[in-house]
Image: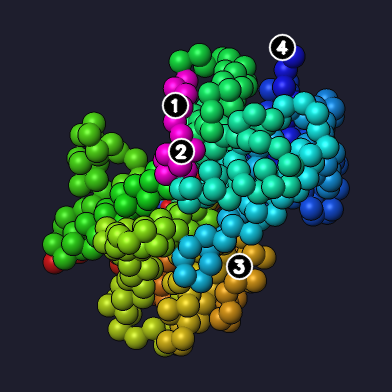
Amino acid sequence: MQKPKISIVGVGYVGLVAAACFADGGFEVIASTNDSEKVRLINLGKSPFFEPGLDDLISRSINSGKLKAVNSRKEAILNTDITFVSVGTPSRGDGSIDLQFIEQSSKEIGESLKLKENYHLVVVRSTVTPGTTQNLVKSTLERYSNKKAGVDFGLCMSPEFLRQGAAVYDTLYPDRLVIGELDAKSGDILEKFYRAYYKQNPALPILRMNLSSAEMVKDVSNAFLATKISFINEIANICEKVPGIDVSQVAKGVGLDKRIGPMFLDAGVGFGGSCFPKDVKALIAFSKSNGYTPNILETIMNVNLKQAEHVKDLLKQNLTNISGKKIAILGLSFKPNTDDMRESPAIKIINSIAPEGAIINAIDPVATENAKKVINHKVNYCVSINECLKDADAAVLVTDWDQFKRLKPKDFAIMKNRLILDGRRVYDSFEFKEAGYKYVGIGLGEEK
Ligand code: UDX
């Protein structure tokens, strides 16, 4: 059989990274979005957003003719064999997810399937609550195509596990692939495509299951990772009560137990981003709508909220009063290597200290423009680290960008008061203490 042609509906970081990777791997790919500006940029070989390595992949795939962007769903569906749906699933006010883009794209894909003679496979890649593909997507596709799922077209749900800032790497080197399938034929086609794309890695585990279980795998993976972070943040807060105890060493000792694992045990100012907060809240809402109150999941979110506020408490403990004090915030994005501000701990930190009269300087390598849109308080956005630190009463490391991690005590010498609050535990506390700084680290019990 010929190589299947691929279409991608939705060009956020999940959809566009997949489009560029599949195209670079030799498949013909059509990326479809309603946003004409994004279509224009992609066809010029550029990414509409910042994601390391993506510009190169897109320009290579556009130049080779393997990738093109269109704003017509019909063109994308009629000219391809497999469609991956990667549209956004934002949070509603009550934490449940808003499925309007899933429903709309299913409708548009259905309308195109109606015009198509050949069998076509639709694969949901967006994060959706269990039951969505089986119920909403399947019925919408059938209604608008006038065709039968499992007979005239196939349907799968295949979650992605990409981290922003490492999305290209994670697409190229996944730990596993999960295929939720309506029927064996749908799953066979998707597995064949994955095996062809990942042919360099024949041992890659590909798990097949039903649609709802695959949806649950995604939600549970994110909830579990978020659990590890809130858990270690809680332990960090306990550690701070005991002189000399260090959560980093504790996490290392604990994480080497293979049953626990070392990753996602970095204590800090809490998790943010477009996934963990949204997906944990969605799982809580889903669980409650099914009559079960998930206590652990609710606590994960509460601990996370408090962790950002904890920064204010630490500042107050060490400055007595933060009113009129100049606080230098190093890093605004929710993690390094992205300009994404969604649910960033920096927002909560600034929102908690600004109303108490703190004067805020902030710097971020790429997220400043996005930060301006979501932070309503007065912030002096700086262009250099020096400008940010000058005359500051305290420096708070919020996002562990490399350029901040590299800073040495001498780089902070222009501060007025030598207080360093290391929100990501990236600095050597001894080095800073030796240089005459007051070093406060999340999860580090102060030596008396
Ligand atoms: C996450 C999942 O890792 C990914 O599998 C899923 O597909 C989407 O959600 P992402 O949100 O891009 O990816 O970033 P991630 O690297 O997981 O970090 C999320 C947040 O947790 C960041 O704010 C980060 O700073 C924080 N974090 C992560 C910690 O505070 N401690 C850790 O040990 C790890």
Say which amino acid is labelled 2.
Ala
Q: Residue at x 39, y 62 (%)?
A: 289
Disc 3, SS: helix
The answer to which of marks 3 and 1 sits earlier in the sequence is 1
Q: Quadrant of residue 380?
A: bottom right
- Give the crowd class for mark 3: few <14, some 14-19, many >=20 residues within 10 Å: many
Marks 4/2: CA–CA distance: 27 Å
Q: Quadrant of residue 448?
A: bottom left
Say which amino acid is labelled 3.
Ala
Marks 4/3: CA–CA distance: 49 Å
Say which amino acid is labelled 4.
Met
Left or right: where 287 falls relative to 106: left
Residue range in magenta is 204-217
The numbered dot on residue 1 is: 4
Badges 1 and 4: C-beta atoms under 8 Å apart?
Answer: no
Decide whether residue 79 is among the magenta residues.
Answer: no
Q: Which residue is the site of mark 1? A: 207
Disc 1, SS: strand
Looking at the figure, which quarter contains the N terminus?
Answer: top right
- Give the crowd class for mark 1: few <14, some 14-19, many >=20 residues within 10 Å: few
The numbered dot on residue 193 is: none
Asked whether the viewer can see residue 16, the reply is no
The answer to which of marks 4 and 3 sits earlier in the sequence is 4
